[in-house]
Image (cartoon, grey):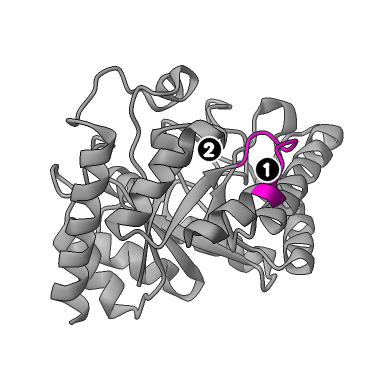
Amino acid sequence: MKYGFNLLLWTGELGEEQMPVLNALKAMGYDGVELPIFNPDLDYATWGTKLDALGLERTAVTVRTEEDNPISSDANVRARGVAATKQALDCCAAVGATHLVGPYHSALGLFSGAGPTADEWKWGVESMQQVAEHAEKVGVMLAIECLNRFETYLLNTHADAARFARDVNQPNCRVMYDTFHANIEEKDIAQAIRDCADMLVHVHISENDRSTPGSGNVRWEENFNALKEVGYDGWLMVEAFGLALPELAAATKIWRKMYTSEEQLAEDAIAFMKQNVAQHWG
């Protein structure tokens, strides 16, 4: 198992001011970090060298918006979505990120007032097939993320995410599992994990209030039992959000600080994950 932390708790873009955070995460015992890729013009190759020197592996996360929505009825908008995610994959290759995770299957926070249409599903699959072909070329694994109904409408359950990836039918297109979204959308946690097990390549460890894992109401015993049952052995990546980024706080609806400090959250999170891995995996 590998232990990582998503840097969105601190920043939306890598910068020198994050070096103390990166050093601290390494000292705590984290194997890697999840990098936000929202600015394609950053010098990712240089950051890859810096992270190598720190001994931190990396995955990455990105999103799509209304302007580059891969399921838009406008073919030009869909094309922009494909191009943007391909660009994010190039950034992943430059920085040495092995996985690109996130809800880049459709626009974040954009709603039609109904569920996905057959056309939207088809457009999404066709867009992702083009992205997945590029992912294979650059050696990065896509890990598609379903989100709860308040953030997106194309993919809300892990069974749907897995079905979507199967329809894409490309070797570099798989899915990730997220404990926060599962806590909202799934009736049976263990079954949700079984439903996506054949496509599962990444896991987000996130509490029901987005703060310290293990401090809230997520059904952790069910989650870890099921992950062990399906033979999962990959990244356990902490995803927590706070007030550091006003735009992200607005998107994730975080209005109050729910932890003592970011550093304490990170320390508690890795202890929690290691304790559960030792207990369930032996």
Q: Is residue 103 magenta?
A: no
Q: Residue furthest right?
A: 76
Q: Say which label, 1 or 2, has the lower sequence index.
A: 2
> What is the three-letter code of the residue carrying label 1?
Glu
Please report the residue visible at 60 percent of the width from the left and 68 percent of the height from the top.
166
Helix, strand or loop at label 1? It is: helix
Side of 179 relative to 11 (left or right): left
Labels in figure, total: 2
Q: Is residue 6 above or below residue 251?
A: below
Which mark identifies residue 71?
none
How crowded pointer 2 is (Cα within 10 Å; few <14, some 14-19, many 20+) is rated as: some
Side of 110 relative to 274 (left or right): right
Foreground pick, 220 / 57: 57
> What is the three-letter code of the residue carrying label 2?
Gly
Please report the residue visible at 71 percent of the width from the left and 51 percent of the height from the top.
45
Res. 240 image quadrant:
top left
Location of mark 1 (residue): 120
Which mark identifies residue 115?
2
> Where residue 19 sits in the image (x, y, percent)?
47, 40
CA gap, disc 1 and disc 2: 10 Å
Side of 18 relative to 49 (left or right): left
> Where residue 119 sits in the image (x, y, percent)?
71, 45
> Where residue 21 sits in the image (x, y, percent)?
39, 41
Query: Which residue range is magenta in the image?
Result: 37-46
> Where residue 146 sits in the image (x, y, percent)?
47, 49
